Image (cartoon, rainbow, N blue to C red):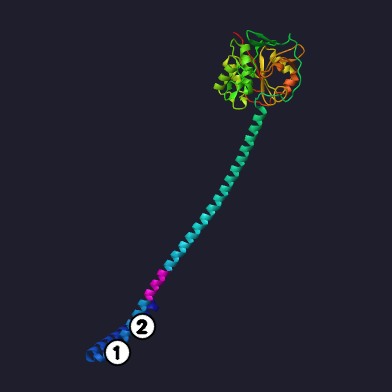
Amino acid sequence: MYERSRKSPVKLIAALVLLAVSCVVGVELLLCRLNDPELYETIVTPIRILYHDTRSQVKGYAESFDRWEDEQARTRAAMAEVQRADAEARRLRATARRQARENAALQREAERRQREEQAYAAELLRNAQEFAQLAGAPSIQEELEKADPAITELVTRDGQEFLTGGNVTLCYFNQGDEQWAEKPFGRDPIGRYGCGPTALAMLVSGMTENRVNPEEMAAWAASQGYSALHSGSYLSIVPGTAKRYGLDCASIPVAEADADTLYDALSTGGVIVALMGPGHFTSGGHFILLHGTTLSGGILVADPNSRDNSLAVWEPETILSELSGSRSDGSPLWLITAPEEL
């Protein structure tokens, strides 16, 4: 407090002196302007010129500063735009790289699926060729010995062939017989692709009171969707036909099947529908019926494509070894029996 009180009068005196000098100068300039205008102008003009020059310079500096600030603002805006453009370019490049990776992955997946589909189609074609039920020469051809007529034979009564022996006497039908060989099974002829409906016509006509020939069975089966174009019958034709005519149908497991399996199944009095693979009966796929056994352990067969095969006695091992490899819809062995009466 003491220091402030000592310095304050000095500042006050200095301010008063400056004010007094300003007042004196102002008064002298006023008197000079009144008494000697020329001298006044001589004194003031340089000051006025300096003032105006200084003011012009200051104004120029201010305008230049404004222009510089505007330029800086534009530069900053341009740099910001460049940065935004660069960021957008980086984003687009990243998106393009990601899209390229995704497209490459999709392309690889599409190629993988195409390879799988081609492999699947090739497998289907191989299966179709292997299992197609196309009538023709069997893979194994040999001269067969006919069975004793007391065991089985073909007899004709009232214009109809019957195959004797076994569990039931079957109406024998051959798919190649002229009365229906060229009749349709779907879009294919019975003579070439109709072993399924022909075998089932024998089955139904022998085990029920219905007399159904191959043409009638083929027409019904095709209407139910059981005909496979250029391949014969879908395997579901067997249980479907059994159900249609009130017969019981049971698949016989073949994983551990042997001769006893066939004997036991046929001992029920039923008939076995067998889907055969390449061998004595076919070079592809083929339906036959096993309709009985012999005292010597043989199997009686009804082959819808061969009367000779139907009149021979077959070893059960031959039947089992030549069964089709298909395992769909209960194949390759179905036991058909008549339901027990209540």
Q: Which residue is mark 2?
A: 10
Locate residue 164 relative to residue 55 in the image: left or right.
right
- For badge 1, the amino acid type reads Ile
Locate residue 91 relative to residue 45 in the image: left or right.
right
Instruction: Provide residue 232's location: percent of width, then percent of height.
Output: 62, 24
Disc 1 from disc 2: Cα separation: 32 Å
Instruction: Provide residue 192's location: percent of width, then percent of height.
Output: 63, 23
Between label 1 and label 2, give the one nearer the viewer: 1
Q: Quadrant of residue 45?
A: bottom left
Residue depicted at x 61% and y 42%: 112
Q: Decide: few, some or many residues near mark 1? Use Cα within 10 Å; few <14, some 14-19, many ≥20.
A: some
Above or below residue 39? Residue 78 is above
Residue depicted at x 56% and y 22%: 222
> Of helix, strand and loop, which one carries label 2?
helix
Q: In the rendering, which numbered label is found on residue 143?
A: none
Instruction: Provide residue 238's location: percent of width, then percent of height.
Output: 61, 20
Q: Which residues are magenta?
A: 61-71
> Which of 75/325 is in front?
325
Magenta stretch: helix, strand or loop mostly: helix
> Which of 165/105 is in front?
165
> Which of 179/266 is in front?
179
Residue depicted at x 72% and y 16%: 308
> Which of 187/197 is in front?
187
First of labels 1, 2 by sequence position: 2
Q: Which residue is mark 1?
A: 43
Residue depicted at x 64% and y 37%: 119
Q: Quadrant of residue 275?
A: top right
